Amino acid sequence: MNAFQVTLRNIKRPDQSKVLQLEAPNREQAALLAAKPGFRVALVKSLAGAPKNGTSKRAIPRKELIKLFRGLASMLKANISTADALLYYAQGLPDPELQSSLMNIRNRLEAGLPVHVAFAKEQKFDSTIITIVEAGADAGQLGEAFSSLARRIKIELMFASKLRTALLVPSIIILFQIGLFIYSQVHVVAKVEETLKSVRQEPDPISVFIFSVSHVVQKTWPFFVIALTAFIVAIFRSPAFRQTLLILGMKHWLLLRKLVMGLRQSAYIGTLQMLYANGINLARSSALSARVMQGTPLYPDFIKASQVYESSGVPFAEALKRNTNLDPQVVHMIGIGERSASLPQQLELLRDIYEEDTAAIMADFTQVINFITLAMAVVLIGFVFTGSMLPIFLMGPRMMQSGNM
């Protein structure tokens, strides 16, 4: 990226001008980005010493993607070409990095690259987005593809927001309580034990147990903190670790399994419905929809089901039944759609049903998580109080007796 200074002159009043500074890959893109109605580009000047090496591959925020795909969909439905839609949307954007990305995509389209390749080369869009863009372009329904992407990302953002609400604040509270418990055991309880020894009083059995727990915590807390820190870092930095943890949780927690399977099946069904309803044959629709599962253990099963359907001639519902773990209701409704030639309608019905069911499961999951975190907080508070205050209460009478002797 390079920095440019662009001078604009008013078409009707040439004595009026505007000077803008912006970043763009080259002079032509700088002129396009700076263009405003009623003004013409008079001068594009490179600002020396302000280049940026390389291009950031940071993913575009999900909220910005929703606005982008909605805007592109509305312009395509108004019979504006994809290249012009990208140009119009990029003009006036406050984010220069997003501006540059859209202009790069436009330039690739102008050079003759397919639209999904133009998006993929920017390396800011995940495989699901590229798959749906490719399928929409193949079907001549790119506007519908962008609308579908905006809808899907909005639903994912809603679920992600609910998950953060359910997990983030309780997790912070629990971490604070753990820190408070360690502090009380290492410092407060140790002080109580020293005080009791200084007055030469033998602790009662309950205090003996509390002091024993304190001794264990004093010896092990650094290792526990290191392990907990490593665990948290692994969750944020390692997709493989997150996937392993998710699989383990799904095996032992039915509600989590229902939630994850609901999200995955909703994504698969929604993509399949969008593709098949817009003219893509079922074999290719199933193969492209399987890519939505990429990165999950379900991906090989859905790819195999697509291949079996395309090569063997068995009904699509039967191929799914033999090779995947889709809910029986999904397979049954797809079979009905195949036999009655109403598959697009059945898929749309299934998509809506699973989105509603997943929203309900998410609400239940949030309530359970809130209850679990509240229970853990109460237990940890109880440990803190018991460890720090109970020995003081129990040794009070002994200290008074010692003082009277």
Image: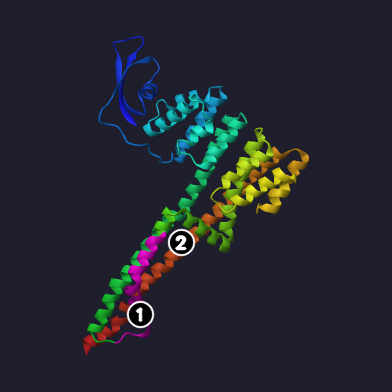
Where is residue 228 drawn, in percent x and y? 39, 63
Amino acid bearing label 2: Thr
Residue under the image location 71 percent in, 49 percent down: 319
Residue with the mark numbered 1:
212
The residue under the point 28% across, 76% down is 190
Image quadrant of residue 270?
A: top right
**Magenta-drawn segment:** 202-231
Question: Depth check: 405 or 201 in front?
Answer: 201
Residue nearer the viewer, 208 or 95: 95
Q: How is the image coloured?
A: rainbow
Measure how far apart labels 2 and 1 are at the Cα level.
27 Å
Is 216 covered by the magenta stretch?
yes
> Which quarter of the figure is the C terminus placed in?
bottom left
* Left-right relation of 373 to 194: right
Q: Which mark is residue 373?
A: 2
Say whether marks 2 and 1 touch (CB < 8 Å).
no
Whether residue 24 sits left or right of residue 48 in the image: it is right
Residue 95 visible in the shown view: no
Percent position of residue 40, x then y: 36, 15
Residue type at the position of mark 1: Ser
Q: Secondary structure at mark 2?
A: helix
Q: Is residue 293 above or below residue 220?
A: above
Q: Position of residue 395 (x, y in %)?
A: 30, 82
Please, what is the dominant secondary structure of the magenta stretch?
helix
Q: Which mark is residue 141?
A: none
Q: Quadrant of residue 285?
A: top right
